[in-house]
Image: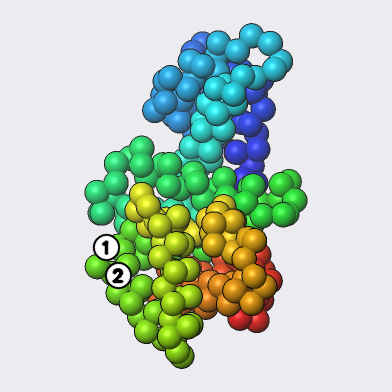
Amino acid sequence: MHPVLARFLTADVAKETLRKQQAGDSLSPEEQSFTEAARAHPRQAAILMDVGGRALSSDAQAALVLLAAHASARALLDDAELAEPARKARAALAEEGASEEETDAFIASILLEEAFGYEQDVDTFDREYVKEALGEVPALAGLTKEAVDALFLGFVKGAANDAERKVREGMARALFDIAWAEGPAPINPEHIEALLDAEVVDKPEEEQEAKIHATALLLQALSREGIMGPLRLSRLRAMLGEEDA
């Protein structure tokens, strides 16, 4: 988990930082990232500041996560190693028409995925994974409907026979609908879980194996196109139990 995300997921710390900003006190770079996120999201900041007790409502929890995630996304620009890939990712999204808010949300989603998407120690920050994920953004941002259609057709045509072609077509269409319904984004564990629930669970064993293998091959195809990095590919294949697919 990114240290800025970890720090401001504590409500008391987040609220105290906003109080410091309101009082005109000096702020650290991390605190400035958080107050900038709060200025960009005044409704969520107001919800957080209205919290009176120790227990947070679902709205307050959601506001806290959003502000902390957006603060960590902004903090990447001050990171010696990640600033350049973060700038390139932002530029690619902006070039395709994304607003600043949409761009912040996209980058924040990467940091939330790193923090909570996989079974790993939340006290560590996987820089290499985040760096790779940021590097995926230009290719994702540039994906048009025509390009997605071409990916789909190319993958389906690679089947050895009609039966495999049918499986490939179904799994590719389902994954793209799940992951890219609102535009191309990094394929993450939630997408794979939703795909398995919708297309694989409760199916006969032979059908399950065919669909899982087709999904693994699809992920490899996306990796060859530069849409998915090797670390993401490895983690998602592990979810499928097809590390050597």
Q: Residue at x 60, y 38 (%)?
A: 5
Q: In percent of the image, x 24 and y 49: which residue is there?
A: 97
Between residue 131 and residue 82, name the one nearer to us.
Answer: 131
Task: Report the residue marked by disc 1.
Answer: 145
Question: Are the two marked residues, 2 and 1, in contact with CB atoms closer than 8 angstroms?
Answer: yes
Q: Residue at x 41, y 61 (%)?
A: 176
Image position, residue 141 (x, y; %):
33, 58
Q: Give the labeled residue for mark 2.
A: 149
Q: Residue furthest bottom?
A: 160
Instruction: Please state which amino acid type lies under the numbered disc 1.
Output: Lys
Q: Residue 220 location, x and y as percent?
A: 51, 77
- Farthest residue toward the front? 204
Q: Toward which corner of the image does residue 188 lie, by quadrant? A: bottom right
Q: Can residue 211 be seen? A: yes
Q: State the SS at label 1.
A: helix
User: In x, y percent, where is residue 221?
Assistant: 46, 77
Q: Return the mark for residue 177.
A: none
Residue at 35% over, 80% down: 154
Neighbours of disc 2 within 10 Å: few (<14), some (14-19), many (20+): few
Distance between mark 2 and mark 1 Cα atoms: 6 Å
Residues 126 and 188: in front is 188
x, y percentage for residue 12? 66, 20
How crowded is the residue under tag 1: few (<14 C-alpha within 10 Å), some, or many (20+)? few
Question: Left of 220 or right of it: where is 92?
Answer: left
Classify the position of the C terminus by image quarter.
bottom right
User: Disc 2 residue type?
Assistant: Asp
Say if 191 sits above or below 171 in the image.
Answer: above
Q: Is residue 194 above or below residue 36?
A: below
